[in-house]
Image: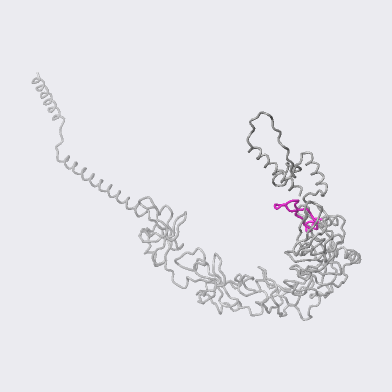
Amino acid sequence: MNLINKQLNADAQENAAASEAAVPTATTNAPVEAPVVETAHDDFDWSIDKRNVSHYAEADRVKYDKVYDNTFVQIEDGEIVRGGVVALTKTDVVINIGFKSDGLVSLNEFRDIQGLKIGDEVEVMVVEKEDRNGNLHLSRKSARIFRAWERIVEVHKTGEVITGTVTSKTKGGLIVDVFGMETFLPGSQIDVKPVTDYDQFVGKTMEFKVVKINEAIKNAVVSHKALIESDIEAQRAEIMSKLEKGQVLEGVVKNITDFGAFMDLGGLDGLLYITDISWGRISHPSEVVKMDQKLQVVVLDFDDDKKRISLGLKQLTPHPWDVLPEGLAEGSVVKGKVVNIEDYGAFLEIQPGVEGLVHVSEITWANTPINAKEFFKLGDEYEAKVVTLDKDARKMSLSIKQMSQDPWNTIETKFPEGSKHKGLVKNITPYGVFVELEPGIGGMIHISDLSWLKRFAHPTDYTKVGETIDVIILSIDKENRKLQLGHKQLEEDPWNALEDTFAVGTLHEGTVTRKDEKGALVQLPYGLEGFAPNRHLNKEDGKQVQADETAQFMVIEFDRNEKRIVLSHARIWEQHIAEEKEAAKKEARVESDKTKKAVKTIQNKVEKATLGDLGALAEIKAKLQEGEGGENK
């Protein structure tokens, strides 16, 4: 109201000044004293501007700012402070921390507090004193995590046991809430036994130990297994102190691997190796033992320092070789299953833990090489005769071929020399083909006996395993059980008839089938092959005959015994050139002879001069010369 009166007084003074300016000035020189007009607004403060803002002196402003700032607390970003709840909305909690303004915190950060009300004190972290909108930014979650991390670091140093709640499953383990902070529980740290179902632990409250922390990223790893191990360590020490080799214990199968089974012996683990599970051969421990199965096992060995115990299951029963049937002896017929195959033979299991070897030489009466890995298959069953038996060494040799009569006893009668037969190709080597005529009887065709005309780099160029081939018995070696077979001998040797056709000097058309640094193979008529050395492939133009090229070749060597034909392309044109030169020389000699003969004939017709005639001629010549000289004068 006072401010309004002042404003009115100021307006009145402005109007009075205007009136005085409008009155005409008196003509007299005597001064005229202006009347003093009092208004109701003489107390108006003219230092206030039109926005109703007063301006203080600098000293007053500093004094008043200091008084104002001292009424609030001093805070920094990242600081943990306590504040009181001054208001609650549907989504936020208003917190007063004694700063210039209150802060808002999401109601979700107070889910762990039941019945939050105005007046409650809570701990929050100052995230920003002033964000982009000028607001105070607080976080209760950050404060809880900060305090939780401090507590976790402390218990990690002291080894204190803490309680946490499993909140969720993640890759490789579980997430555990400890003091309001998420920590990681690896699957290997859940229990001393392997755990496959992580879901069963979600929502459970358990005890843990902090086993690892990372200060840089504020990450912690907890373990429940460490608590269990500490509890059973005393049990382990007690069990190890009472262990003896040969002691029989009861255990539970807790894990099965390819190499054995781990057993829980009541706080102490032992390994039941696969070779100690059964006297017989097994490919995997699961064929005999199952998970969580209770078994009686014997202690084979143990290591106090490494806490390792080797267990045995098969040792609780007698060794099968010690309880062999009375009737089993050399010459007995047994039945067994193939349990192992090696290059040198196969092992037949007669009964669990008792095996016999069928050597490759005892598979068939034939003397042809046999690949045991191709002949036998795991799991197949065979009857065999016991050849040798050594119970002390626990070894047995078996024979399959001796289950039938030796066909070599009557070989000359059934397969005499010169007889023709059909056989099955059983094996091929670089030097020949092994043919089976009947089970136990077979022989080899050497690579050179496959064809009269063609040479093969490998027998597979002519035949394949499993094909049928015609053969003739060339010879019999009964003592060494060998048959020499032939295939080309089924036909007459065509080289006898071809000797005239491919005589040295004859020309034939041929195609180069293969070429190397030494020369080329040339396919000739009648299925024959010849060889042309590299220098004999030269053409008249300086180039060479190439692979797959057809050209004329001259036979320069024919060896019927070695079945070899040597050819030359260069010899054709070289010989032609030589013949032309020779013809030219011959013609020149003929002409020379003709000339000599004509000269001789003429000489014979001319009369020979005498010495007197020669003297007369000399005189005539001298006179003539004198006459010529006189005329010149």
Q: Residue at x 41, y 56 (%)?
A: 546
Q: Position of residue 353 (x, y in %)?
A: 76, 74
Residue 43's image quarter?
A: top right
**Outermost residue toward the bottom?**
327
**Vertical placement of residue 24 versus 394, above or below:** above
Give the colour scheme of this rendering: one colour
Q: Is 447 displayed left or right of 281 in the figure? A: left
Q: Is 422 on the left or on the right of 226, as rendered?
A: left
Residue 217: quadrant of the picture? bottom right
The residue lying toward the viewer, choosing from 79 and 331, is 79
In percent of width and height, residue 580 lies at 29, 50
Residue 577, percent from left and from top: 32, 50
In the depicted view, which residue is nearer to us: 227 or 336? 227
Q: Nearer the viewer, residue 585 or 96?
A: 96
Q: Is residue 239 magenta?
A: no
Stretch of the chain drawn in magenta:
124-146
**In the image, is 14 to the left or to the right of 305?**
left
Identify the residue at the far front of this view: 28
- Residue at screen point 44% across, 71% down: 492
> Does the stretch in magenta take in 126?
yes
Is any part of residue 183 visible from this angle? Answer: no
Q: Quadrant of the C terminus?
A: top left
Q: Nearer the viewer, residue 129 or 482?
A: 129
Residue 143 in view, yes or no: yes
Residue 211 picture location, percent across and down: 82, 58
